[in-house]
Image (spheres, grey):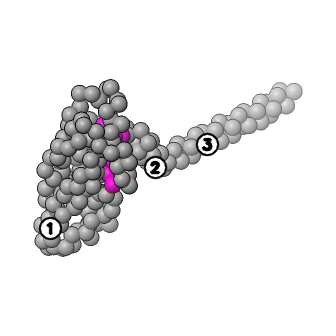
Amino acid sequence: MSDFSDSRLGAATATRNKRVALAGLGVVLGMVGLTYASVPLYQLFCQITGFGGTTQVAVESPKGAIARQMTVRFDSNVAHDLNWTVKPAASVTDKIGIVDTVNYVATNHSDRPITGTAVFNVAPERAGIYFNKIECFCFTEQTLAPGETVDMPIVFFVDPELDSNRELDTITEITLSYTFYASDNGGS
């Protein structure tokens, strides 16, 4: 009788161990799947909410201008492995809703073509949802020939809806900052 109980107990333990192993494997696979999905989901969340200073993409300024003015400052940083200099555009002060065009100026100081890309953010972060880019060099990779200097335009406006957000009543300046990196293709 003892042998029968031991074999039933052993079979029950083996079944529980298999369930625990399968549950653990399911958790691991779920975590791997979420890891791969997290970047696009986070980007989508930021684009919808403006979280982290993520700007919006627009075709035009649909609401027109309002009397309130806003200064937009521009900033640039270049990663150490990208042999470029990038001069940011001069600050712009204009009525909210007006479409403005500015240019960053990039120069490749290497003796070979280099492909770079830019990531951006807006400060203060709460204003990101109201900052709309119609055209921007950050949407595509840029390849500069050796010694080449190029103008890199940004066409943008600040959405007049910003004026209805009471938390942003004291905001008079927005900073658009770009960080430039060599592209994943090795910079060429």
The quadrant in which residue 155 appears is bottom left
- The residue wearing badge 3 is 26
Tell me the kind of residue under disc 2: Pro
Q: Is residue 167 above or below residue 23?
A: above
Foreground residue among 2 and 174: 174
Start-end of magenta stretch: 127-134
Q: Is residue 108 above or below residue 11?
A: below
**Image quarter (top left, top right, bottom left or bottom right) of the C terminus:** bottom left
Tell me the kind of residue under disc 3: Gly
Tell whether 170 sits left or right of 50.
Answer: left
Foreground residue among 26 and 102: 102
* Of the image marks 2 and 3, the number of the one nearer the N terminus: 3
Discs 2/1, front: 1
Q: CA distance from mark 3 to mark 1?
A: 52 Å
Determine the secondary structure under disc 3. Answer: helix
Local packing at callout 2 (Cα closer than 10 Å; few below 14, some 14-19, many 20+) is few
Q: Tell me residue 43's x, y (percent).
A: 42, 46
- The residue wearing badge 1 is 149
Residue at the (60%, 43%) spot, across then down = 25
Local packing at callout 1 (Cα closer than 10 Å; few below 14, some 14-19, many 20+) is some
Asked whether 131 falls inside the magenta stretch, the response is yes
* Of the image marks 2 and 1, the number of the one nearer the N terminus: 2
Tell me the kind of residue under disc 1: Thr
- The residue wearing badge 2 is 40
* Of the image marks 3 and 1, the number of the one nearer the N terminus: 3
Asked if the residue under mark 1 is in contact with the one under mark 2, i.e. CB atoms within 8 Å, the reply is no
